[in-house]
């Protein structure tokens, strides 16, 4: 995202070039009403600063998904001004909504500027053709009317070189403001984390039984925070005195053991232990990564739910992370009486998410306005190699730099390409990383995946498809492996010229994404 000056904004708006410039150069996407309100604000400022002066460093529509988007941000060497735009207020409740929005946004802004006096939250309101400015008082958590001169003071125009040309909020990485509840159990237990409005809504629907039936499905792709919402819901239910059984796939980690001992009324078990568990002892059964349940496990839970309509079953799952035919995904999908979706990828890096989607689907993936293709290589590194032998030295080099190497799980019966990487120390496989996130990931893709037509998806008709003899769904394993990365993804393309050409021409080439 690039900054815009006041004069530049008004000039582009006057020539009807603003929308095109925002999409293709500044990488933001203001709504029409926001553009109209910004023009009014900037004209007021222009009247005060004079014809021959300008104000630099404005950023528009900054969205990191975890909180509501920031309408306008401006950073100086000592402060931040955060401007909320409103063109009308129908009732007093909207004032409360703005106060709540500022309160949530401040938790992010304080990562950049730890001292509260360095942050100025301002509401610019147009109501009945009258323009007002309000500042958010942190101590009273309320809006206070100010005049335009006080607002201009926040801009620190006396120091022309004071504005910062980088968007410090956009530069934050998910690891700066998100926690892994299994790794940072103290922060989780002490509520030191964020939930998006969408996550809060899903949780409230569960707590207040707003869904039909007693089996609720919560669908969400990688990075939408399913595990965090599942655990947060379990914690809230336990505080209400409900007995909760939390079922997860994979190994019992130290974090699970810690939460099991410190959260009252919550019992954590691995999915394989379900056969030895007295399900009737629990009011709620929460299943994380439910797509990994074996079919007989899913049927057991379904039978229990049918026979016990007073018990609540919550299934958190992602169909893209189902790894084999023995998984009970399709049974689970049909089992749920009601489904809700988590769509915002709060744990995902926007650039890495875009890159993965572009590889998974050869056509039909549009570039978000916030993506600056010139910055894609800051987050994604791609290398081409003729063979696994050639690729392994580079993979080992990335491991030495702190990257986590993730390979497909392989096949116990057949020899597959993943076997070629068994001599690399400290590798992890797909089954072991589902539900986890890592700052830096290195993985590979080879000739075991090609593009094939997918008649089930008219919007994205050409999809990455397995052609190897791997037992597991290799395309889903690739998706899981790549989507573990929150900060940097390094990808070795091994003997797959088609995918390499697609990435170079269609992903990194600006004209191909225009």
Image: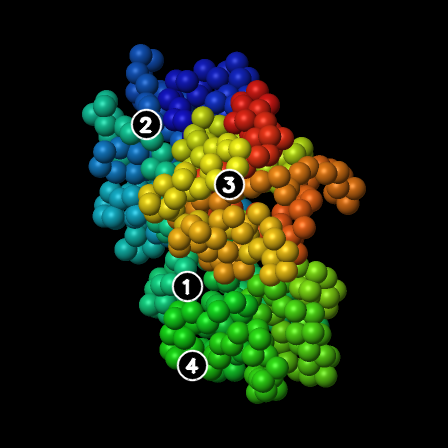
Categorize mark 2 by other alpha carbons within 10 Å: few (<14), some (14-19), many (20+): some
> Mark 2–mark 4 contact, CB under 8 Å?
no
**As rendered, which of 282 and 148 lies closer to the eye?**
282
| Mark 3 / mark 2, whichever is N-terminal | 2
- Residue for point 75% across, 38% down: 453
Q: Could you tell me how far apart the alpha carbons at marks 2 and 4 are, in whole angstroms? A: 49 Å
| Mark 2 / mark 4, whichever is N-terminal | 2
Task: Report which residue position mark 4 lands on.
Answer: 264
Categorize mark 4 by other alpha carbons within 10 Å: few (<14), some (14-19), many (20+): some
Task: Report which residue position mark 1 lands on.
Answer: 181
Task: Report which residue position mark 3 lands on.
Answer: 388
**As rendered, which of 181 and 16 lies closer to the eye?**
181
- Residue for point 61% across, 70% down: 314
Residue 488 visible here: no
Secondary structure beneath label 3: helix
Q: Please state the horizontal and vertical placement of residue 68, each as a whole percent of the image.
A: 47, 47
| Callout in the foreground (2, 4) | 4
212 up-or-down from 355: above or below: below
């Amino acid at each position: 995202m690039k900054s815009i000056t006041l004069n530049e904004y008004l000039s582009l708006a006057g020539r009807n070039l603003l929308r095109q410039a925002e999409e293709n150069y500044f990488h933001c996407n203001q709504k029409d009403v926001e553009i109209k309100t910004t023009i009014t604000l900037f004209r007021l400022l222009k009247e005060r600063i004079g014809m021959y002066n300008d104000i630099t460093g404005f950023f528009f529509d900054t969205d990191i998904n975890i909180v509501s988007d920031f309408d306008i941000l401006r950073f100086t060497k000592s402060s931040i001004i955060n401007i909320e735009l409103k063109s009308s207020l129908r009732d007093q409740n909207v004032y409360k909504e703005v106060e709540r929005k500022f309160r949530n946004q401040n938790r992010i802004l304080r990562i950049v500027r730890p001292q509260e006096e360095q942050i100025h939250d301002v509401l610019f309101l147009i109501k009945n053709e009258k323009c007002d400015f309000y500042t958010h008082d942190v101590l009273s958590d309320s809006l206070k009317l100010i005049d335009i001169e006080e607002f201009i003071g926040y801009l620190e125009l006396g120091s022309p070189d004071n504005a910062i040309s980088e968007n410090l909020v956009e530069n934050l990485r998910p690891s700066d403001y998100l926690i892994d509840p299994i790794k940072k159990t103290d922060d989780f237990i002490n509520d030191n984390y964020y939930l998006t409005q969408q996550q809060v809504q899903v949780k409230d629907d569960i707590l207040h039984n707003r869904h039909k039936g007693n089996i609720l499905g919560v669908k969400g792709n990688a990075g939408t925070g399913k595990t965090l919402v599942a655990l947060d819901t379990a914690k809230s239910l336990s505080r209400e005195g409900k007995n909760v059984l939390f079922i997860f796939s994979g190994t019992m980690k130290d974090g699970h053991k810690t939460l099991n001992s410190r959260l009252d009324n919550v019992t954590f078990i691995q999915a394989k232990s379900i056969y030895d568990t007295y399900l009737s002892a629990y009011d709620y059964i929460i299943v994380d990564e439910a797509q990994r349940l074996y079919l007989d496990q899913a049927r057991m839970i379904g039978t229990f739910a049918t026979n016990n309509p007073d018990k609540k079953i919550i299934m958190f799952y992602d169909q893209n992370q189902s790894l084999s035919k023995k998984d009970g995904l399709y049974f689970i999908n049909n089992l749920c009486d009601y489904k809700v979706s988590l769509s915002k990828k709060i744990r995902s890096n926007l650039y890495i998410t875009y890159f993965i989607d572009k590889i998974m689907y050869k056509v039909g993936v549009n570039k978000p306005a916030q993506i600056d293709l010139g910055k894609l290589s800051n987050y994604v590194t791609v290398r081409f190699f003729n063979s696994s032998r050639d690729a392994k030295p580079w993979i080992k080099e990335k491991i030495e730099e702190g990257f986590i190497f993730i390979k497909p799980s392989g096949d116990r019966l057949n020899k597959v390409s993943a076997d070629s990487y068994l001599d690399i120390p400290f590798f992890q496989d797909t089954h072991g990383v589902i539900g986890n996130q890592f700052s830096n990931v290195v993985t590979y893709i080879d000739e075991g995946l090609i593009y094939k037509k997918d008649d089930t998806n008219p919007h994205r008709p050409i999809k990455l498809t397995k052609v190897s003899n791997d037992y597991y769904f290799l395309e889903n394993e690739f998706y899981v492996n790549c989507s573990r990365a929150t900060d940097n993804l390094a990808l070795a393309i091994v003997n797959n010229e088609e995918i390499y050409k697609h990435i170079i021409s269609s992903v990194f080439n600006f004209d191909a994404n225009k």
